[in-house]
Amino acid sequence: MPRGLFKVVIDPGHGGPDPGAVGIGGLRETDVVLDVSLQVAQLLQQRGVQVLLTRTSEVDVDLPPRVSLANSSGADIFLSIHANALSMSRPDVNGIETFYFESASARSLAASVQQEVLAVSPGSPDRGVRQGRFFVIRRTVMPAALVEMGFVTGELDSPRLADGQHRRRLALAIATGLLNYLRGGQ
């Protein structure tokens, strides 16, 4: 793939004073998603893709600036990376899901990411590719998706999300899903 041909915005959810969901063993969504997002960025950059991150450290970034950065960047795609949560009393709920807002191209992007993340999460339920109204995917002008890589409150997902090797696999899966989409899986 020619260097610099594509530009991608990666949005690690939450950050700073907003840890996002907190799950089993005090596992914080923000820590999981920042680690995975930084690895995804590095993997894409190694393939010649230009990457913008909405945050690269534990800082709080409101939703509108995330969207503004994406919309002014001329990026081809936008992906927001999250980990899901439910009540700590429901460790039986696990699974991977990816959201898009409306367009067919956004749905293709979401499906491409969902397929790869599921492949490295054996046994974790496929919660599907679904329409969602999250601000960051509703307001961005390019195809955008939001992936939930598993439940920090889930008895199956949580230990995986806490494991550095599994986060590496998730990063590789997400990068592969994005590259497959960019290579013409639209």
Image (spheres, rainbow, N blue to C red):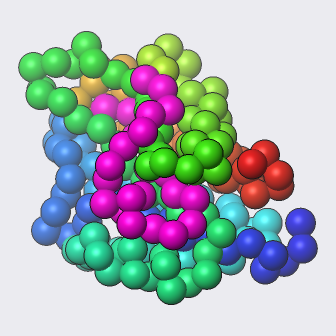
Q: How many marks?
A: 0
Q: Can you say whether 105 is above or below 92 in the image?
A: below
Q: Quadrant of residue 125?
A: top left
Residue 173 sits inside the magenta stretch: no
View extreme (right): residue: 2
Q: Position of residue 164 (x, y in %)?
A: 47, 45
Q: Position of residue 108 (x, y in %)?
A: 65, 43
Residue 129 sits inside the magenta stretch: yes
Q: Can you say whether 143 is above or below 170 in the image?
A: below
- Whether residue 171 is visible to the viewer of this picture, yes or no, is no
Q: Residue at x 32, y 49 (%)?
A: 133
Q: Residue at x 21, y 19 (%)?
A: 91
- Whether residue 151 is visible to the viewer of this picture, yes or no, is yes
Q: Position of residue 25 (x, y in %)?
A: 18, 36
The N terminus lies in which quarter of the figure?
Answer: bottom right
Span colored in magenta: 127-151
Left or right of 59 on screen, residue 159: right
Left or right of 51 on screen, residue 123: left
Foreground of the two, 108 or 6: 108
